[in-house]
Image (cartoon, rainbow, N blue to C red):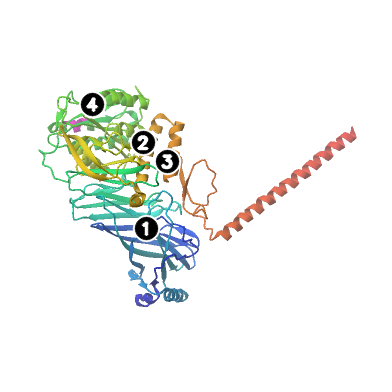
């Protein structure tokens, strides 16, 4: 087809409150771009999102390819959410490997051009916009659904590109970008290939870069102090949450940025505080010397790929230690074996790596004694040296003390203020134990499969513990009364990393306060004062930060689930998780998303609720078809029931007649 001819018919019109293909103007599509073909939402073959943020101006380029599996032509509706206040720069369709840009026309002219093109069998699209109501307890954006009528030939592909720009808020030194990705409320089909890249370029230094929604799967890189990039990729995935990026800026040595939200006149507020250090390059002499102790699980459950992965991870970290670091190794199965009687200098690591390579897996799993032994290797004569334990295991205790609660009690009794525990779980692991032992000891956990490549996840893991810049953190919020602060204790701050803290504050608090950050640098006490930090007390002014309550609720639920996984399903804890999930729209083991035609906004349900679910893969073209199918099913069931009833009735009569004949003979 000639693109010039197509351009005359390929038109776009943006209007307010436009209903297309029976989609209600009050229905909000909070999801990645979807194609509705005859009433059924279909996922793209691929969805590629390229975001460029330049000094808080974000430009989003969304490219998606769809496939019409029907053997006839259809006029479908493409629906994509666009944030409130965003400006649509362009909409294009790929024809013969060339992008054909849409044009703005009067509504009547555009509709006429579209109808003419379709009648002639030409590619065409007609676009519009409609407003939508936010879901309960959700941020006010996105509010607008961009809708496009798209003509698709039979058994054909269609590639669409939508570009829009928006100004991001950053008044409190905290900037947030959201790409509406969740579509579990509309379809269960997976996206074939999902790729999101966010490139941030700011005039001033960027401190923290944080993705609260995909923190374990998005790769973050910081090539320069004022730039950052995030990449997320997944195949055959059904996204269940939006993709969010938060970054902060501050001129202070340790930047502290706080966003707060309050709603109504009586409810207490919510806050999120992000602290991050300056990104400064350190020489070997400036890096804080550390003591590393590796715990290697060599029990029988680690046989095969697990022990190979664990040994590779240990040797990779050992090979990257700084010149002033020291190390030791604790290997365990039923018994515990220490590689050396004392901490060794880095120069000795070659022999240690050879020793590790000769370890084989056999015996039981005495996790308790291994942790206690490693904690006792701390050098208390040098309190300025962080004592970092790297625990490599599948976390399945079988010998000695095996109860998780008892193991945690013994770890608390044996640990010192210098000690931190970081866990690397390999294969099928006891995540509850590893998460608990790490979070209680100011560490984190990394989980890898027994066969996945280790280089990237392990590099990110080690980078997060290699350069501690502030340890033993504490915060004083001045005259503002805070509670339910997560996490507790506050983890250490590392070069290139950040500390994210969420909590609640009393509604009667002052609107400004002084926050004091304290900690230790190289064994010396440190404190920093931040004046005039604002806490919102007015619900109108707080609206841009409506995402904050959900951040707090998710952290709260994560901590409650950690307790449940360790201590068992205490009814009070389960009820608290359920109540939080229902109030803040969170997916938990006790709640799920549900969408019912006519229901409006998707909501949360409890798993034991009775739901009649229709899979999106069943192509009921409209409600009339669905009602016909249900009616036929009811007629069939009724007919079968009637036949069974008649057979039973006849058998009953025959039985009764036989009984009477027998009585007559007698």
Q: Secondary structure at mark 3?
A: helix
Judged by depth in the image, the label closer to the viewer, 3 or 2, is 3
Please name the predominant secondary structure of the magenta segment in the image.
helix
Q: Secondary structure at mark 4?
A: loop
The residue at which mark 4 appears reads as: 416
Judged by depth in the image, the label closer to the viewer, 3 or 1, is 3
The local crowd at label 3, few if under 14, some if 14 to 19, many if 20 or more residues have their Cα within 10 Å, is some
The residue at which mark 2 appears reads as: 559
Q: Residue 120's mark?
A: none
Q: Residue 46's mark?
A: 1
Q: Is residue 88 left or right of residue 529?
A: right
The residue at which mark 3 appears reads as: 580
Q: Earlier in the sequence, mark 3 or mark 2?
A: 2
- The reply to whether the magenta stretch includes residue 353 is yes
- Write the start and end of the magenta stretch as one range: 351-355
Disc 3 from disc 1: Cα separation = 34 Å
Disc 1 from disc 2: Cα separation = 35 Å
Above or below, comparing residue 502 to residue 13 in the picture: above
Q: Secondary structure at mark 2?
A: helix
Disc 4 from disc 2: Cα separation = 23 Å
Q: Earlier in the sequence, mark 4 or mark 2?
A: 4
Task: Tell me residue 509's x, y (percent).
Answer: 32, 41
Question: Residue 92: which quarter of the image?
Answer: bottom left
Judged by depth in the image, the label closer to the viewer, 3 or 4, is 3
Task: Tell me residue 354's x, y (percent).
Answer: 19, 32
Q: Earlier in the sequence, mark 1 or mark 2?
A: 1
Q: Earlier in the sequence, mark 3 or mark 1?
A: 1
The residue at the point 38 percent across, 61 percent down is: 65
Question: Residue 159: which quarter of the image?
Answer: bottom left
């Amino acid at each position: 087809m000639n693109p010039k001819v197509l351009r005359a018919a390929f038109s776009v019109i943006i209007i307010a409150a436009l209903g297309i293909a029976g989609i209600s103007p009050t229905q909000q599509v909070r999801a990645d771009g979807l194609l509705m073909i005859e009433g059924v939402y279909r996922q793209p073959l691929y969805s590629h999102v390229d975001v460029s943020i330049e000094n808080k101006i974000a430009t989003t380029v969304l490219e998606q390819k769809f496939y019409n599996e029907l053997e006839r032509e259809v006029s479908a509706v493409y629906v994509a959410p666009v944030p409130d206040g965003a400006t649509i720069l362009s909409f294009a369709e790929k024809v013969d490997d060339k992008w054909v840009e849409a044009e703005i026309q009067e509504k009547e002219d555009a509709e006429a051009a579209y109808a003419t093109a379709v009648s002639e069998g030409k590619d065409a699209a007609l676009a519009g916009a409609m407003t939508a109501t936010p879901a309960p307890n959700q941020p006010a954006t996105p509010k607008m659904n961009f809708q496009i009528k798209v003509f698709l030939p039979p058994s054909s592909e269609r590639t669409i590109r939508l570009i829009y720009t928006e100004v991001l808020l950053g008044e409190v030194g905290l900037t947030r970008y959201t790409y509406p990705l969740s579509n579990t409320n509309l379809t269960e089909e997976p996206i074939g290939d999902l790729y999101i890249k966010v490139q941030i370029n700011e005039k001033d230094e960027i401190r923290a870069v944080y993705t609260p929604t995909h923190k374990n799967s998005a790769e973050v890189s910081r090539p320069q102090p004022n730039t950052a990039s995030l990449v997320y990729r997944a195949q055959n995935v059904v996204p269940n949450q939006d993709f969010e990026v938060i970054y902060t800026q501050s001129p202070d040595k340790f930047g502290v940025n706080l966003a707060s939200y309050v709603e109504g006149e009586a409810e207490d507020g919510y806050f999120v505080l992000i602290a991050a250090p300056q990104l400064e390059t350190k020489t070997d002499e400036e890096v804080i010397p550390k003591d590393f102790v590796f715990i290697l699980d060599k029990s029988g459950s680690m046989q095969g790929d697990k022990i190979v992965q664990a040994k590779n991870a240990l040797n990779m970290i050992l090979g990257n230690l700084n010149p002033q670091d020291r190390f030791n190794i604790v290997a365990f199965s039923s018994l515990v074996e220490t590689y050396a009687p004392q901490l060794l200098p880095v120069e000795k690591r070659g022999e240690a790596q050879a020793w590790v390579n000769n370890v084989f897996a056999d015996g039981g799993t005495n996790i308790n004694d291994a942790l206690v032994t490693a904690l006792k290797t701390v050098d208390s004569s040098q309190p300025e040296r962080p004592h970092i334990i790297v625990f490599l295991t599948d976390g399945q205790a079988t010998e000695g003390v095996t109860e998780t609660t008892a193991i945690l009690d013994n770890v608390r009794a044996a640990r010192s203020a210098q000690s931190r525990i970081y866990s690397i779980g390999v294969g099928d692991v006891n995540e509850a134990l590893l998460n608990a032992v790490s979070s209680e000891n100011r560490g984190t956990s990394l989980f890898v499969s027994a066969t996945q490549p280790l280089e990237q996840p392990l590099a990110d893991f080690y980078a997060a513990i290699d350069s501690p810049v502030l340890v033993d953190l504490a915060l004083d919020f001045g005259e503002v009364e805070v509670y339910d602060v997560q996490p507790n204790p506050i983890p250490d701050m590392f070069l290139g990393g950040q500390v994210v803290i969420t909590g609640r504050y009393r509604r009667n608090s002052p609107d400004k306060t002084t926050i004091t950050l304290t900690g230790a640098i190289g064994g010396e006490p440190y404190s920093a004062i931040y004046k005039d930090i604002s806490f919102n007390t007015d619900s109108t002014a707080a609206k841009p930060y409506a995402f904050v309550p959900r951040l707090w609720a998710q952290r709260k639920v994560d901590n409650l689930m950690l307790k449940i996984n360790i201590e068992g399903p205490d009814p009070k804890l389960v009820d608290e998780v359920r109540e939080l999930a229902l109030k803040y729209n969170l997916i938990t083991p006790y709640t799920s998303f549900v969408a019912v035609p006519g229901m409006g906004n998707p909501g949360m349900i409890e798993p034991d609720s009775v739901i009649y679910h229709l899979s999106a893969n069943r192509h009921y073209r409209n409600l009339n078809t669905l009602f016909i199918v249900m009616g036929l099913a009811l007629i069939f069931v009724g007919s079968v029931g009637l036949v069974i009833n008649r057979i039973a009735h006849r058998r009953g009569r025959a039985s009764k007649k036989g009984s009477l004949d027998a009585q007559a003979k007698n």
